[in-house]
Amino acid sequence: MMNDKLVFLGLLYFIQGIPYGLQSSLLPVYLRGAGHSLTRISLTKILYFPWVLKVLWAPLVDRTCTKRCWLVGTVAGLALTCLVSAAISPDVQYMGVAGSLLAMNVLASVQDIAADGAAVRLLRGQGELGLGNTVQVVGYKAGSVFAGGGLLAVIDVAGWGWMFALLACVYGGVALFVWGAPVLDGESLRGQGEGRRGSKDVMQPWKVWRKLLSVPGTPWTMFYVLTYKLGEQGAITMFPLFLLDHHMTARELGVWNGVVAMAFSICGSSIGGFLLSQYSIGLLMRRVFMMRTVSMVFQSSLLQTMRSSNHNGKNVFGAYVTIGESIAVLSLSLQHFIAGLITTLTFTTMMNCTQRAEESIQATHYSFLATLEVLGKLSFSALAGGMVDTVGFPIAFILFLFLTSSSALHVWRATETGILKEQLKEQPQ
């Protein structure tokens, strides 16, 4: 039964990561190669905005119909959107591409609410919670690699249209799988009953918000998920573009940043799930956040050095690169590995907080925290390019380092006197 749950959730989060992979790995390199400014590239992050707004319709998804209906409807909608995207020419229909990606983000954000609600209900006990959050993070990132890194590597062979036709088949197959998934068989009657009882609350959203904010640990978790990725997100977004400006090709970035670095991120997320079964989450967060700060110090110093480095040696693609650029790939991989670890720890912290809420608002509560998490990353990603254009890479990375250090201090204080204190010595069950 547990394997059925993991396969079900893994597939849902895999296809949920596809729009992110298309937009985060394909568009920045494509637009930069076409000569667009970093400011304009950063502004494409606006297409992620439905993920910020999803908390507004989360109560509707939480209280009406069943999770199966919402999941099948949104996944089928994604399949249709991909079929439309296959007929678009990205070279001459830029706004059409943007519209298709926006539609995919809208549908994926609604799917996310239903998938999170199903996960909160299906996962029971510390063991299932750790494995479930690992599958969630790894599945999402694997979807990103499949869409982003894979598309950059094979688009010259398969073409834009055939790639989206393939994605439409993937979404269609998953929609059929969810329609017949036995793990959701027990939710139908309960979901209908809760829908009738909760319909009044949907029409009175202030009652829902009051319940959300009264859940123990919610205020600290809100601030944490808003800020924990700020410095890291700025570095992860801008460092690959710095390498592109310093003679690393788009093809190389497609491999190193779209595939290799993401593989390190998936590895970090997987190891995070294993560590959660061995150590307390408070102790892990304390140590991993310090590791991330040290990693940022190293990357910022490396960036300063690379700006004046001379080119020598050859890489496997035949391009002349410096030893510093080789170390940069290692730095990028290490950064993604630590980011994967922190993401698994963070989503487990969020789900721990959500499971203290009433069952009737758990999906809404988790979606609320996830929305804040996306808002923190999205807002800073949209500003990072303009910041680099204005003050340059060196000063921008000093700010990224300051924000990373501040989040580490916030977590450390929580393990000393705050919400994570009681979890510091707590052993996993």
Image (cartoon, rainbow, N blue to C red):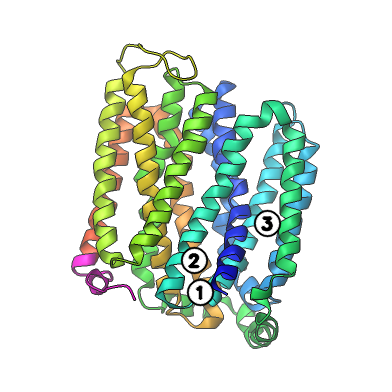
**Residue 40 is covered by the magenta coloring:** no
Q: Which stretch is magenta?
A: 415-429
Taking depth in this image into account, of 103 and 204 the one nearest to the observer is 103
Q: Which residue is mark 1?
A: 123
- Using the numbered discs, state the Cα–Cα distance from disc 1 to disc 2 in whole angstroms: 7 Å
Is residue 405 among the parts visible in the rendering? Answer: no
- Amino acid carrying mark 3 in the image: Leu
Tell me the residue at 64%/71% (across/down).
61
- Using the numbered discs, state the Cα–Cα distance from disc 3 to disc 1 in whole angstroms: 24 Å
Of tags 3 and 1, the one toward the viewer is 1
- Amino acid carrying mark 2 in the image: Gly
- Using the numbered discs, state the Cα–Cα distance from disc 2 to disc 3 in whole angstroms: 22 Å
**Residue 426 is covered by the magenta coloring:** yes
90 displayed left or right of 390: right
Dot 1: what SS? loop
- Residue 87 lies, with reference to residue 253, above or below; the image says below
Dot 3: what SS? helix
Name the quadrant of the N terminus. bottom right
Q: Label 3: few (<14), some or many (≥20) within 10 Å?
A: many
